[in-house]
Image (cartoon, coloured by chain):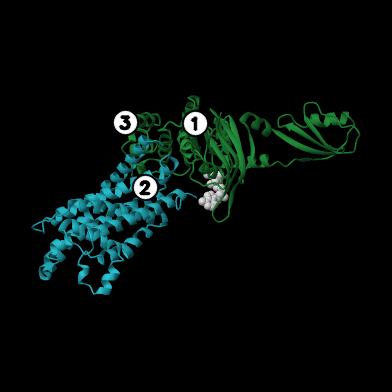
Amino acid sequence: MNQSTSLIALKTIWIKECTRFLRIWVQTLVPPAITMTLYFVIFGSIVGERIGQMSGVTYMEFIVPGLIMMSVITNSYSNVASSFFSAKFQRNIEEMLVSPVSTPVIIAGYIGGGMARAMIVAVIVTAVSFFFVDNVHLEHPLYVVLTVILTSTLFSLGGLANAVFAKTFDDISIVPTFVLTPLTYLGGVFYSVSLLPDFWQGVSMANPILYMVNGFRYGFLGQADVPIGVAMAVLIGFNIAFFVLVYRLLSKGVGIRS
Amino acid sequence: MNALEISGLEKVYKGGFKALKGIDFSVKEGDFFALLGPNGAGKSTTIGVISSLVNKTAGSVKVFGYDLDTQLMELKRQIGLVPQEFNFNQFETVRQIVVNQAGYYGVPRELAHQRAEKYLTQLGLWEKRDEPARSLSGGMKRRLMIARALLHEPRLLILDEPTAGVDIELRRSMWDYLTRLNKEGITIILTTHYLEEAEMLCRNIGIIDAGQIIENTSMKRLLATLSQETFILDVEASDKQPSLEGFATRWTDEHTVEVDVDKNAGLNGVFEQLSAHGIKVLSMRNKANRLEELFVNLVEKGRQQGTGGAA
Ligand SMILES: Nc1ncnc2c1ncn2[C@@H]1O[C@H](COP(=O)(O)OP(=O)(O)O)[C@@H](O)[C@H]1O
Ligand SMILES: [Mg+2]
């Protein structure tokens, strides 16, 4: 496949993926808006008033980047996991398998879909946050954008790997429930890990999501629990590792070819 | 040039079941070829390997000279596949499905839309273009898969049991359409377990049973073979071993002879000629023939499923 045909194929998969989540927007775009509004109301306004400041800003300002990041993670992951799994389930994945689309193009197309949904949700959540925060900081926009991109690609890849192994619809909700949600909560969305005892700070550093939340918070507030360079390096490293994993799985036809 | 060349193809599924036991056959460019066999024979497995949905265990596959192992992408471009089971996204519209498929093959979007109109119209689906696929009837879904397979204008169209579950009228129009495509130069391979369908459409035929090709010949020759029966006659030992006029005759030893008899010709001639040579027939039996048995089976099944009378 030469460059221009690969590009057409990539665009096709991307448009198809975007069409899918836009078609079912009530399931894909509305829930994060509602959930995040609740978080803002409860943690930001009601509880936040009593907490006062965290890391030198109001509690509300502190949690906004974390909550956006949380939406980016869940939405990119579940977009790709459910889309790819349902393509396996309805067997329309075969449409791609019989055609001369290369594996990297398939992966890139799905990442593009996950990223698009994550971005739209991020914009929605950010828009919602404007109702609760008076002065929005945006210290390093470049890092904000970089972190969102790297996080959404990483979790799109994760969702894809999950869907490759999944045999039932239940299998694609196990990881979000038992792995992603706990890691996100423990990743410093609601608190600064500097408040933890040394031991738990050390444990928290093993959580990759901590780096994403903090990279993002750095972009907004100009400060974070980990150096920005480290956060970026961790994100890039995980991206490469997951890409290699997913590429191997798909090339071998794990879960998709008999 | 051969549109398809398969040699020594084997498939062992996970769990150890050997679905293909080393099959060889080829299909010439421009041919209309039937792969006929009962359920479970290995037709879909063979098609799966050719279209790279199933990993082969051994053997080689070439499509218009492109090797499956070394020139996969070029090979894929040559093929349009209509699988046995519906395998599109039920929630996408008819037009989205075909246009996207063209996109995977690198057909520019505008051209894809033009072709979508052309093929959906030919297959009577243009009116339904914006309906989600799940709202189509079974026959329409089948035709949607044919349209989808044509959008990148392949040289080889492979259809896996395209008329299963399609009513008689529709089946006929599908046959006409396939004949027309073939006349326009597309090589067509279809699998079926209806002898009638193969007879109606195809010039050449491969017969597969239990993972083996048991016959690969022209439709004409196959029908000629099927119209004959072979009898084994035990005779009183004789030094004469004459050939019988009008019957293919083979002496296996001095008191056994095999005779091919046309089903309409009757056996009288055989006995008359043997008597004239003074040879006494002691007993006679029908020679068991795997192909024959298979056909009796296939034809019976076809009748039971109501295709026999239709064709
Ligand atoms: N994924 C699979 N795993 C194990 N066995 C299979 C699989 N697919 C098909 N088979 C077996 O292989 C044989 C051939 O199947 P198939 O090629 O579908 O036959 P046909 O299309 O001629 O009806 C059957 O016995 C079937 O049960
Ligand atoms: Mg089959």
Up/down of B136 relative to A122, above or below: above
Residue B110's label in the rendered image is: 3
Is there a contact, CB below 8 Å, between mark 2 and mark 3?
no
What is the chain letter for disc 2?
A
Question: Chain in cyan?
Answer: A
Task: Report the mark closest to the observer, 3 or 1.
Answer: 3
Up/down of A85 relative to B241, above or below: below
Which amino acid lies under the numbered mark 2 shown in the image of this protein? Ile
Which amino acid lies under the numbered mark 3 shown in the image of this protein? Glu
Q: In this orientation, which residue lies closer to the viewer: A40 or A241?
A: A241
* Callout 1 secondary element: helix
Q: In this orientation, which residue lies closer to the viewer: B275 or B248?
A: B248
Residue A107's label in the rendered image is: 2
Residue at which label 1 appears: B175
Q: In this orientation, which residue lies closer to the viewer: B62 or B263?
A: B62
For the N terminus of chain A, the quadrant is top left
Name the quadrant containing residue B102.
Answer: top left
Q: Evaluate whether label 2 is on the same chain as label 3.
A: no
Up/down of B123 relative to B44, above or below: above
Give the class, few, some or many, for how many residues have Cα within 10 Å of label 3's Cα (few <14, many ≥20).
few
